[in-house]
Amino acid sequence: MNIKEDYNPDNEVNFQNDLQYIDMQQEDVPLTPMSSETKKPQIELLAPAGDLERLKMAITYGADAVYLGGQVFGLRAAAKNFSVEDLEEGVAFAHQHNAKVYLTLNIIPHDEDLEGLPSYLESIKHIPIDAYIVSDPGTFDLIKEMFPETHIHISTQANTTNTRTLKFWHRIGAQRVVIARELSFEEIKNISDNTPDDLELEAFVHGAMCISYSGRCLLSNYMIQRDANRGECAHPCRWKYSIVEEKRPGEYMPVFEDETGTYFFNSKDLCLVNHIPELVKAGITSLKIEGRMKTAHYVATVVRVYRMAIDTYLKDPDNWQPDPAWMEELNKASHRPFTTGFYFEKPGPEEHIYEDPKQLRTYDFVAKVLSYNSSTNTATVEQRNRFFDGDNLEIISPHKPLQHFTVTDLKDADGQAIDNAPHPKQTVSFKVPFEVAPNDLIRKERTE
């Protein structure tokens, strides 16, 4: 049961002109490649990529690295994911922009799942993937056997919660561990202080939280025979439940954890944007955003905010303060109410959502800029949600402040005047009184 907030397009847009527009090298904070000699040369911002478009959007808006799944062996089977050809293009794009790509092979496999893994790895061995993310020792062993020099990251699905386990993974050849979400800052700092300096720590800092320990859930398996640990979770933790007494079939009684509602499995979303110093001081190398099922607008919005927060911290760590505008911006993308998870203390009843499982957002993603004619002040865009001539819209860009304008002179692809853009992926044009660029996103404030 996935909730779609925005129209999710096919990845057909040509990004050939990206390099003319975007220089992903940060002017104030140079991107330093990770090395095995030092543990924290650079705080990495790691973003989800559900398909090729979202990979390019994440990197365009400031991600240092992306994680993604192929069409097999990953834990997001419902995502569009990457064919071998898409993976080739995505890795090439990332490396052109000095970013990295990590491939998830993190299902908990049965023997039948492992049968096709060697041939799949053989089919992608020519692609310079920066690391593989795994949770299963058998998968780890096979990758090491086939690619002895490759980097391997241990998935959060392995629920690594103690120093000894991290040392074990390091001893057999892992370069990074995605630590369990159930750890506090104090525990993470202790782990960082007592593990080898060349073992990197990665942690989730933003996005949906699984109700089960490190995502090891059997609800989906039991209720509709979709194995969450093999990439097919139906998210039954977000459903509404009632109870039925054995001798009164058909009489449904609500399940109350307290008097406000019944969604007792439904967790708030994680958000650590106001706690960058604590993340860095705990020894976390890579700050990870959840959301391979999310839209391009979500990825761009969240990555852009965390990019600003990290860069602001790196410029002046001693005087860093959260900017209230960051939370305002995060609220424009689909989200549930936010929590800091386990980082400060174990979550209590207030960290759950009892009233409504729906996600919140204050803006709709309506278009993506394809080109801009500065002589006529005309933007050509690809529609993603319906908008009208006369609408007040907002532009989000990778390296510019937010800008606003009113749609005028709206025309279809044939140059005919229209009063609205109703069709998904429809190409339209209109006047914009300032310069915009390819991959700028356009959104509209919700009035309902």
Image (cartoon, rainbow, N blue to C red):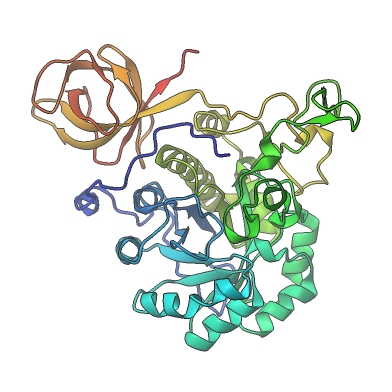
Q: Nearer the viewer, residue 305 or 300?
A: 300
Residue 292 against residue 174 in the figure, above or below: above
Instruction: Tell me the quarter of the image containing the N terminus.
Output: top right
Residue 412 against residue 85 in the figure, above or below: above
Point out residue 386 in the picture as x, y percentages from the top left corner: 33, 22
Position of 264 with respect to 116 (left or right) is: right
Position of 442 with respect to 162 (left or right) is: left
Displayed quadrant of residue 175 = bottom right
Point out residue 53 in the picture as x, y percentages from the top left corner: 34, 49
Point out residue 272 in the picture as x, y percentages from the top left corner: 64, 44
Q: Nearer the viewer, residue 14 or 324?
A: 14
Point out residue 212 in the picture as x, y percentages from the top left corner: 75, 50
* Residue 344 in view here: yes
* Residue 27 in view here: no
Residue at 45% x, 43% y: name it.
299
Position of 276 with respect to 146 (left or right) is: right
